[in-house]
Amino acid sequence: MDYAAARKVMVDSQVRVNDVTDRALQAAMLAVPREAFVPAERAYAAYAEVEVEIAAGRKLMLARDLSKVLQNLDARENETALVIAGPYAAAVLARMGLKVTAQESDAAVFEVCGGALADAGVETVVAPLSQPTGEGWDIIVSEGAVAVRPESWIAALRMGGRLIVVERPGPAGKAVLYVRGERGVSRRELFDAHPDLLSELTPEPVFAL
């Protein structure tokens, strides 16, 4: 399979047509080998409009949705970024010149794509997703969805830092931008998206009589 050609088709048919005009982002997605972030037996599906499993239930976000997420981050060269449950997004941001750390709760994910992340210059951390590693991040982003607003993620941002995550309290989800400021946190809904929920951040259902 000609993966370089598949990347071009992906960017042309899934990214550019969805009003993603950031040329640095387009170039990064043309350069990063998306097939390297899934097991070899699933590489053929890496550029299709499907959420391909990496390992341990973790999946690639649709390229269409991820490109819109990353464009709305307004990422800048040399900023620091923490990518939670999103190794492919981490590599794309690194290609754009950011200093990136990828955090996963299951080492099995990095067993699949750790080599690709190392090649991209991304640091990796295995730790529970409920507690971000480090603090003072310019950017935090995830390819997975959450049921409720992740307060610990917001607390790990610097003042003026940005977080984008898909909030999915029910069947429908919405990508949301948070900006941490001196007077609190602003919130702006961006677009509909429906990636799988991050199970360890999903509250147990409460039943009441």
Image (cartoon, rainbow, N blue to C red):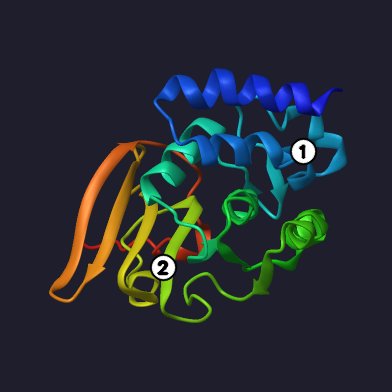
User: Alpha carbon of mark 2 to alpha carbon of mark 1: how far?
Assistant: 28 Å
Is 98 located above or below residue 129 in the figure?
above
Please tell me which residue is depicted at 40% across the width and 64% down the height of the picture. 204
- Give 25 or 169, whichever is nearer the viewer: 25
For the point 43% across and 63% down, which residue is it? 139
| Of the image marks 2 and 1, the number of the one nearer the N terminus | 1
The residue drawn where x is 43% and y is 30% is 21
Q: Nearer the viewer, residue 196 or 30?
A: 30
Total tally of numbered discs in the picture: 2
Is residue 17 placed above or below 171 in the rendered structure?
A: above
Name the residue located 72 percent from the left edge and 57 percent from the top edge. 120
Residue 138, label in figure:
2
Residue 41 in which image quadrant: top right
- Is residue 203 visible in this depiction of the protein? yes
Going by the picture, which residue comes out furthest to the left?
Answer: 183
Look at the picture and state if 129 lies above or below 50: below
Circle 2: is it few (<14), some (14-19), or many (20+) Cα within 10 Å?
A: many
Question: Which residue is situated farthest in the bottom direction here?
Answer: 134
Three-letter amino acid code at the position of disc 2: Asp
Nearest to the eye among marks 2 and 1: give it.
2
Q: Secondary structure at mark 1?
A: helix
Q: Position of residue 84 (x, y in %)?
A: 54, 62
Q: Where is residue 179, by image quadrant?
A: bottom left
Amino acid type, callout 1:
Glu
Q: Is residue 142 above or below residue 3?
A: below
Residue 35: image tag: 1
Q: Secondary structure at mark 2?
A: strand
The quadrant of the rendering that contains the C terminus is bottom left
How many C-alpha atoms fall within 10 Å of the one at disc 1: few (<14), some, or many (≥20)? Answer: many
**Is residue 62 in view from this perspective?**
no
| 126 with respect to 174 (left or right) | right
Which x, y percent locates residue 110?
Answer: 75, 61
